[in-house]
Image: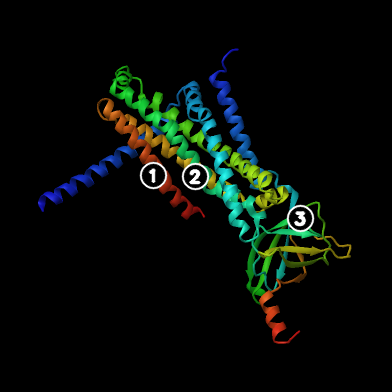
């Protein structure tokens, strides 16, 4: 058998290296090569305490997008404005309800969307009007203890 | 007293001179790379030596690093009852820190020492002087292929390290200790961001520069005789390993 040439060995090495780099960046790093299959939505919450950008956006437990950015909206009495990137395939009606929910014992926050019944579809740059804020567990417990519920 | 001050002054002058020489060395190497890139075959030969031949040792270290991360991470996370997070622990520590640093250290030990010894022996046997006397530039034939191929090979080796390590962690965590395979990969994909991959990439490229820079420099300015080459090789390996760790700290604190 002929010994493999230097070029062939280097070629295989480069191929393996570039493939693993591509795997890391596309599968794990979620690098989007095609930018077209997402659209942006925004929603304003009273409080998004604990929510981080990159958190998932779900309908019925199925991930349909991610939280892109969270910013303060001083014009409307210091509310939190959350920008969502939603897959184009997931069409939302304009009466959908977005709520901040907690998953698991560590308190991983995500956004749950309950679809509405209207026939108006939200387009890119649209706004989800109905929102429910993050549930503050400590406040709930203190209200329970002091008998407000 | 005066003697002490003179000694201090001499030491700092020598240090400054050394730093200036190193800076000149790397600037001139880059100038040579841009102005007269050598033959592709010289580059392939160095890629073969620095990259492809390091594959096996990188594979071994990566597999065992990933496996021990899986083991340690599992028993630590078990205390909090969240062994489902194992995937993100293994992936994040590999991609951000261990992948770039360990692959760079292995390449330093395997290829960096060889580079210094090779160039050092060329220097003491006057082969570099022979090149110069024939008006052939030693930088073009010796330095630029090595520096370029280290810059190309290190990021690739680092991503191979990351992947192999993640699968090593998978073998131990999922197959041996019984973590849910879906949880392992889902948590990993959820917690690893594009920024983490990017930081690892930047780190490994800069480590490639550090290794090839220090090792070529130490070989080029080696001392006399066999003893000089052995000293140069030792100090090249020690210096690049220490610099890699220090630079890693600075990059992490700046980029994170």
Circle 2 residues within 10 Å: few <14, some 14–19, many ≥20: many
Q: Residue furthest bottom?
A: A147
Q: Secondary structure at mark 3?
A: strand
Of pointers 2 and 1, the one earlier in the residue sequence: 2
Horizontally, is A122 left or right of A27 in the view?
right
- Residue annotated with mark 1: B242
- What chain is tagged by disc 2? B
Q: Nearer the viewer, residue A38 or B254?
A: B254
Badge 2 is on which residue? B203
Q: Neighbour class for label 1 at 10 Å: few (<14), some, many (≥20)?
A: few
Numbered disc in front, either 1 or 3: 1
Q: Position of residue A68 (x, y in %)?
A: 67, 58
Residue on which the image places disc 3:
A63
**Residue occupying the point 35% across, 20% down:** B136
Based on the displayed image, in which of its 4 quarters is residue A93 positioned? bottom right
Q: Secondary structure at mark 1?
A: helix
Above/below status of B190 relative to B116: below
Q: CA distance from mark 2 to mark 1?
A: 15 Å
Using residue A115 as the reference point, say whether residue B134 is left or right of it. left
- Compared across the picture, whether B217 is left or right of A81 comes to left
């Amino acid at each position: 058998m002929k010994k493999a040439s230097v070029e062939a060995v280097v070629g295989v090495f480069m191929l393996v290296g570039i493939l693993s780099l591509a795997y890391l960046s596309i599968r794990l790093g979620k690098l989007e090569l095609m930018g077209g299959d997402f659209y942006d939505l925004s929603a304003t919450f009273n409080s998004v305490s604990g929510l981080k950008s990159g958190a998932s956006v779900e309908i019925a437990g199925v991930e349909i997008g991610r939280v892109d950015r969270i910013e303060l909206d001083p014009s409307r009495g210091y509310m939190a404005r959350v920008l969502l990137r939603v897959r184009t395939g997931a069409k939302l009606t304009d009466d959908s309800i977005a709520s901040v929910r907690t998953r698991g014992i560590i308190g991983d926050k995500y956004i749950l969307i309950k679809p509405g019944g209207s026939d108006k579809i939200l387009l890119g740059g649209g706004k989800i009007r109905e929102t429910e804020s993050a549930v503050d567990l400590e406040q709930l417990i203190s209200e329970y203890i002091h008998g407000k519920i | 007293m005066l003697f002490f001050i003179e000694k201090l002054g001499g030491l700092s002058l020598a240090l400054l001179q050394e730093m200036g020489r190193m800076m000149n060395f790397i600037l001139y190497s880059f100038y040579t790379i841009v102005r007269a890139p050598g033959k592709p075959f010289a580059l392939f030969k160095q890629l073969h030596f620095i990259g492809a031949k390091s594959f096996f040792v990188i594979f071994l270290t990566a597999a065992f690093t990933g496996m021990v991360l899986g083991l340690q991470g599992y028993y630590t996370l078990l205390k909090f009852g969240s062994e489902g997070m194992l995937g993100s622990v293994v992936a994040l520590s590999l991609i951000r820190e261990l992948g770039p640093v360990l692959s760079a250290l292995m390449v330093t030990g395997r290829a960096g020492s060889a580079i210094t010894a090779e160039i050092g022996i060329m220097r003491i046997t006057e082969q570099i002087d022979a090149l110069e006397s024939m008006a052939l530039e030693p930088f073009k034939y010796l330095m630029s292929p090595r520096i370029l191929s280290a810059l190309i090979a290190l990021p690739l080796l680092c991503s191979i390290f990351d992947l192999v390590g993640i699968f090593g962690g998978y073998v131990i965590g999922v197959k041996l200790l019984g973590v849910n395979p879906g949880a392992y990969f889902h948590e990993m994909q959820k917690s690893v961001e594009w920024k983490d991959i990017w930081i690892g990439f930047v780190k490994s490229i800069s480590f490639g520069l550090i290794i090839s820079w220090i090792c070529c420099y130490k070989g080029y300015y080696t001392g006399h005789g066999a003893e000089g080459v052995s000293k140069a090789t030792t100090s090249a390996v020690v210096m690049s390993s220490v610099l890699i760790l220090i630079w890693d700290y600075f990059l992490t604190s700046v980029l994170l």
